[in-house]
């Protein structure tokens, strides 16, 4: 199959979250399966040094009735996958990807429409007829809409099917309806079923009705998106798609996340008891300025500091743990300044037991995964989540909330503790400080008093594999299903 993968970020080139991991790993695996995959992404300023050296081809792309843009396709490759970086200086030659560090760019709807439209027009320029156009998140979500509306009668795309993958349904791009005309959406689609959302234009919401198929990054999240609690305000759209939303769990890049080979670590290790993990723990305590103590349980968290990650109710649990219990915490994250201030306050009160590093640090994130005993992930919602999967591989026992991809990737230790052969971690359900604290204390008890059980859970987790090959095969089967089915036709189609 010819697969056009449109993404606003790609791991190794530019990354803010999980989408980048998928946009790197999935095309790579699909290519291994024998498919012809091209990634189209923006030529951001931060990548200037890379793509300015790539061969280029100029072409024009019609955005709306009023506006045609001249863009350049820069031809390169990333880890063996062909990449086309779309150079449009007015959109991408600026500091920042989605925002200037404080505020989202006001013209984001237009910038990413240029990307999406240029991706489709590039196919025509090269006469590279895609079987599948795979769009990702709101940024390229309009691909299905354009194929349905702007190119409906274009024979070039007559056999093409569109897929829209949701990596985080909370980001939908609500904007002023004045953008409608500028990004080529006819006014008749500005209705409550399609793009209108309480007086705003909602790009993701509208786009969902035009994709031939919609996927998300775990079966658990796919189910939650169709519910009022988990559907980010557009659950009815997820319930009324052209065909039911499919959840395909992300894989893990074990080339990067393997404790046996990880170059970021002080010591590599194959199992949690061969001494390597213990050395990593002491090294982490030293690096983070915590008291060096092999026995004290060391809990970790790494995440963006945003509401989604449940930090607001994790903070009081941290305070309680510091005040009443014998454990240490190593935390890495950046984001909300109010949360940063609260975490720094705990650090000041317990400097040798609680350490928070404010920033983004890839190497440290590997050393935290390797050196900690347990990993806390109390997310309010979690489309897939990666750190719990890394934790399993590194013998760091995950404690997660029963939500989204967390429930699909961690097997909880049951209350009766009878499932020791399969348990890989701990899980709680209610989004409350009380529930999180109770499960954390239960976990600490197992760590302190039942080391044989603890080791079994670690071993079970380290043996688990979440392979990208398996995920890629599921995407492949989904693409085939779409190609064997008629195209989706929107009721208001012209
Ligand atoms: P999300 O995509 O919602 O941020 P995921 O768990 O799916 O959450 O993926 C986050 C990725 O970003 C993981 O690889 C995680 O290790 C990494 N990450 C998040 N915050 C940091 C940080 N401050 N430093 C280093 N890596 C981070």
Image (tube, helix red, strand yellow):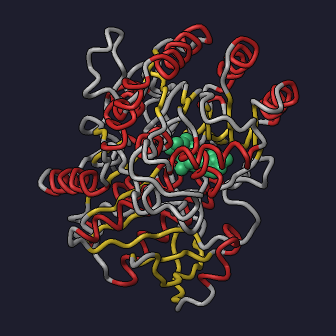
Left or right? Give the position of 82 relative to 168.
Answer: left
Q: Residue 46, image x and y in percent?
A: 69, 71
Residue drawn at (73%, 60%) of the image = 96
Question: Which of these two is toward me, 453 or 135?
Answer: 453
Relative to 56, say whether 339 is above or below.
above
Question: Which of these two is toward me, 225 or 186?
Answer: 225
Q: Which quadrant would residue 222 be assigned to in this image? A: top left
Is residue 207 visible from the viewing direction of this image? Answer: no
Left or right? Give the position of 139 relative to 395.
Answer: right
Residue drawn at (38%, 56%) of the image = 149
- View extreme (left): residue: 484
Quadrant where the N terminus sits is: bottom left
Q: Residue 265, image x and y in percent?
A: 57, 58
Relative to 477, say whether 302 is above or below.
above
Q: Residue 130, image x and y in percent?
A: 28, 70
Left or right? Give the position of 147 relative to 320.
Answer: left
Residue drawn at (59%, 26%) of the image = 198
Relative to 395, say whether 31 is above or below.
below
Q: Which quadrant would residue 231 be assigned to in this image? A: top left
Q: Residue 459, image x and y in percent?
A: 35, 38
Question: Which of these two is toward me, 333 or 426?
Answer: 426
Question: Which of these two is toward me, 82 or 443?
Answer: 443
How many numbered marks are there?
A: 0
Residue drawn at (37%, 23%) of the image = 453
Is residue 279 visible from the viewing direction of this image? Answer: yes
């Amino acid at each position: 199959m010819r697969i056009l993968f449109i993404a606003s970020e790609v791991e190794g080139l530019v990354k803010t979250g999980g989408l980048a991991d998928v946009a790197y790993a999935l095309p790579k695996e699909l290519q291994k399966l024998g498919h012809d995959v091209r990634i189209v992404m923006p030529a951001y300023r931060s990548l200037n040094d890379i793509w300015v050296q790539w061969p280029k081809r100029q072409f024009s792309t019609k955005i709306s009735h009023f506006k045609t843009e001249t863009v350049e396709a820069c031809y390169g490759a990333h880890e063996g996958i062909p990449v086309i970086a779309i150079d449009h200086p007015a959109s991408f030659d600026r500091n920042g990807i989605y925002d200037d560090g404080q505020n989202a760019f006001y013209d984001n709807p237009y910038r990413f429409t240029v990307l999406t439209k240029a991706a489709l027009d590039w196919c025509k320029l090269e006469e590279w007829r895609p079987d599948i156009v795979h769009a990702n998140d709101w940024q390229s979500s309009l691909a299905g809409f354009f194929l349905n509306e702007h190119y409906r009668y274009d024979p070039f795309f007559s056999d093409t099917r569109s897929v829209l993958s949701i990596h985080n349904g909370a980001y939908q791009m609500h904007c002023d309806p004045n953008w409608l005309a500028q990004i080529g959406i006819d006014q008749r689609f500005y209705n409550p079923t399609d793009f209108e959302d309480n007086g705003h234009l909602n790009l993701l919401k509208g786009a969902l009705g035009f994709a031939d198929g919609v996927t998300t990054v775990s079966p658990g999240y796919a189910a939650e998106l169709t519910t009022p609690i988990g559907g980010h305000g557009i659950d009815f759209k997820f319930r009324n798609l052209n065909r039911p939303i499919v959840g395909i769990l992300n894989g893990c890049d074990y080339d990067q996340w393997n404790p046996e080979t990880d170059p970021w670590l002080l010591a590599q290790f194959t199992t949690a008891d061969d001494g390597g993990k213990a050395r990593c723990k002491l090294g982490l305590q030293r690096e983070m300025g915590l008291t060096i103590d092999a026995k004290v349980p060391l809990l970790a968290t790494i995440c963006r500091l945003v509401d989604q990650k449940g930090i607001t109710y994790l903070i009081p649990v941290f305070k309680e743990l510091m005040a009443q219990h014998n454990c240490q915490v190593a935390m890495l994250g950046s984001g909300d300044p109010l949360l940063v201030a609260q975490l720094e306050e705990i650090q000041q009160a317990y400097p040798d037991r609680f350490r928070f590093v404010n920033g983004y640090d890839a190497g440290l994130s590997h050393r935290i995964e390797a050196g900690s005993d347990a990993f806390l992930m109390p997310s309010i919602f979690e489309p897939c989540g990666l750190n719990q999967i890394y934790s399993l591989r590194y013998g760091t026992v995950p404690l997660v909330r029963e939500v989204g991809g967390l429930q699909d990737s961690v097997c909880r230790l049951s209350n009766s503790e009878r499932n020791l052969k399969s348990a890989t971690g701990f899980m709680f359900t209610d989004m409350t400080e009380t529930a999180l604290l109770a499960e954390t204390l239960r976990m600490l008890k197992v760590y302190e008093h039942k080391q044989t059980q603890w080791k079994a859970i670690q071993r079970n987790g380290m043996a688990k594999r979440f392979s990208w090959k398996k995920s890629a095969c599921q995407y492949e089967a989904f693409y085939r299903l779409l190609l064997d089915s008629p195209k989706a036709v929107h009721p208001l189609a012209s």
